[in-house]
Amino acid sequence: MKNSKLVLFIFAAALLGTVGCAKKEGCTDINGNNYDSGAEKNSGCLFRYSSTIDVLGVSDSNPNGDPWDIDGTGPDLRMNFGKSSSSGFDFSTDIRNDASTATLTPSSSIQFTNAEWKYQLIDDDLLTSPETIASGTFNPVTQGSSNFISITNGNIVLKFNYTVR
């Protein structure tokens, strides 16, 4: 009887020790879309990657009331963006000529990180210096849901679309 109680005690202690040592699994990378601050063991993170940027509500004239372009047309939209810690902009998009609404595409798929990022929407004419239309900051990991981050800047709405993989 003593042996069976001893065996049962050892078995119970081993079982409790195993359960007590199990580490909670989850995404341990702070840049992960599915980051879990309570996770102790990494079990597959998903990340946000840029896809396109929708631009809505840009005025046909600049703040002075003049047309953006010398020929009287709307702005030639391009978006620069990147980590705020960079001295310049890490990424930019294609240009949409004479547009107040556009879908811009970055030159490559960019993995967003959990940091402050900056953006600058510009009128990018080839003959004159670029003019800033809107600028600001955002965190692409903590902001947004449903595969986009929406930013309102005055009358302008920017929608940073992303895929999760």
Image (cartoon, helix red, strand yellow):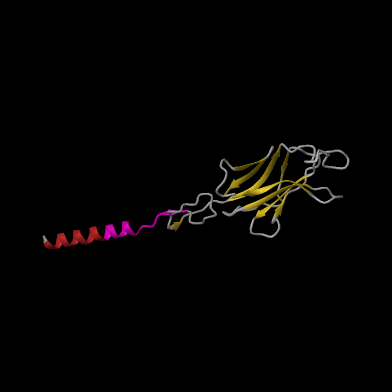
Q: In the orientation shown, which residue stands out farthest toward the left?
A: 1
At a point 70% along the width and 56% down the height, the residue shown is 89
Q: Is residue 16 above or below residue 61?
A: below
Q: Is residue 131 above or below residue 86?
A: above
Q: Is residue 16 above or below residue 78?
A: below
* Number of on-image labels: 0
Quarter of the image for residue 41 reads: bottom left
133 displayed left or right of 10: right
119 displayed left or right of 3: right
Residue 89 or residue 152, whichever sits in front: 152
Q: Is 34 in the magenta?
A: no
Q: Main secondary structure of the magenta part?
A: helix
- The boundaries of the magenta stretch are 14-26
Residue 125 or residue 24, whichever sits in front: 125
Q: Is 24 in the magenta?
A: yes
At a point 62% along the width and 46% down the height, the residue shown is 162
At a point 71% along the width and 49% down the height, the residue shown is 120
- The image quadrant where one finds the N terminus is bottom left
Residue 122 or residue 99, whichever sits in front: 122
At a point 31% along the width and 59% down the height, the residue shown is 18
